[in-house]
Amino acid sequence: MAEPAPLLSIQDLRLAFGGLQVLAGVSVSVGRGEILALVGPNGAGKTSLLNCVNGLYRPDAGRILYAGEEITGWPPHRVAGRGIARSFQLVELFRHMTVLDNLLLGRHIHMRTGIFTGGLYWGPGLREETVHRRAAEEVLDFLELGGYRRRPVASLPYGVQKLVGIGRALAMEPTLFLVDEAASGLTRQEKEDLARFMLRIKHERGVTILWVEHDVQLVADLADRIAVLHYGQKISEGAPAAVLADPVVAEAYLGLAGRG
């Protein structure tokens, strides 16, 4: 029996800024329902790869296929409309707005009423508002953020803001979730909470995850597979234990060359 086609297939992706080769022929795929962790040192090209997938960067060469359809070079709004959501390393939220309002912004790709009917807040506009508010509230409950729903984002601890960013992405109802260093800056307890939510996102919501992360032990515990980038090239890919035992990875990323 043939293996099912991957949800995301990145083929020979190349990206350069001036004379700097950021991605040098990277190929990687993500299966449906999988968590694939993308790790590597700073400057390895991890975030640039995510930027190519969600349309912030246009690659110089290569192809990006999503559910069998080529999306290479699509603008971000079109990529999002196809079912690909993104959270960012830095908290990219509207800090003066409440948690609930930030999540409602994640619902914009599903909104159908125009300015006139939405502004009058009656009939179709009112019904749509009710549906989207209910969906946002469900995500708040899923991430245990209900107690923060009316608070402005700026007043929240950093770890909670990170969860709000994840919540806004989930409010889009994605099939594929691009996660960029969600664990950076978090305490140990916050990382444990994040790990629990990432597994629930996979198993309970059926979302496929491509996760860029520096905390190797965290993703080793959670990911189905790990791919390692180094100077814009993929140097290893496979099950977490096998990748972390790879001497090439130890030398290039973990800095263990020469140790017994």
Image (cartoon, rainbow, N blue to C red):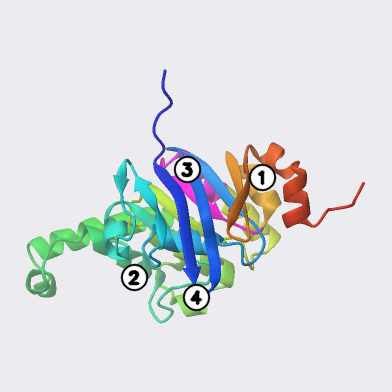
Q: Are marks 3 and 1 in contact (CB under 8 Å)?
A: no
Q: Secondary structure at mark 4?
A: loop
Q: Residues within 10 Å of mark 4 (few under 14, many from 20)?
A: few
The amino acid type found where label 4 is placed reads: Gly
Image check: 120 left or right of 170? left
Q: Residue 248 at x, y = what percent?
A: 74, 47
Q: Which mark is residue 29?
A: 3
Is residue 146 in view from this perspective? no
Q: Secondary structure at mark 3?
A: strand
Between marks 2 and 1, how big is the CA–CA gap?
34 Å
Magenta stretch encompasses residue 207? yes
Residue 236 placement: quadrant: top right
Front position among marks 2 and 3: 3
Image check: 122 left or right of 241? left
* Mark 1 lies on residue: 220
Q: Residue 223 at x, y = what percent?
A: 59, 43
Residue 157 placement: quadrant: bottom right
Q: Residue 140 at x, y = what percent?
A: 41, 58
Front position among marks 4 and 1: 4
Q: Which mark is residue 101?
A: 2
Going by the picture, which residue comes out furthest to the top?
Answer: 1
Between marks 2 and 3, how big is the CA–CA gap?
34 Å
Considering only order in the chain, which callout, 1 or 4, is on the residue closer to the N terminus? Answer: 4
* Mark 4 lies on residue: 18
Task: Magenta stretch: give its range.
Answer: 196-214
Q: Residue at x 31, y 67 (%)?
A: 105
Q: Residue at x 35, y 51 (%)?
A: 174
Considering only order in the chain, which callout, 3 or 2, is on the residue closer to the N terminus? Answer: 3
Quarter of the image with the N terminus in it: top left
Front position among marks 3 and 4: 4
Between marks 4 and 1, how big is the CA–CA gap?
35 Å
The amino acid type found where label 3 is placed reads: Ser
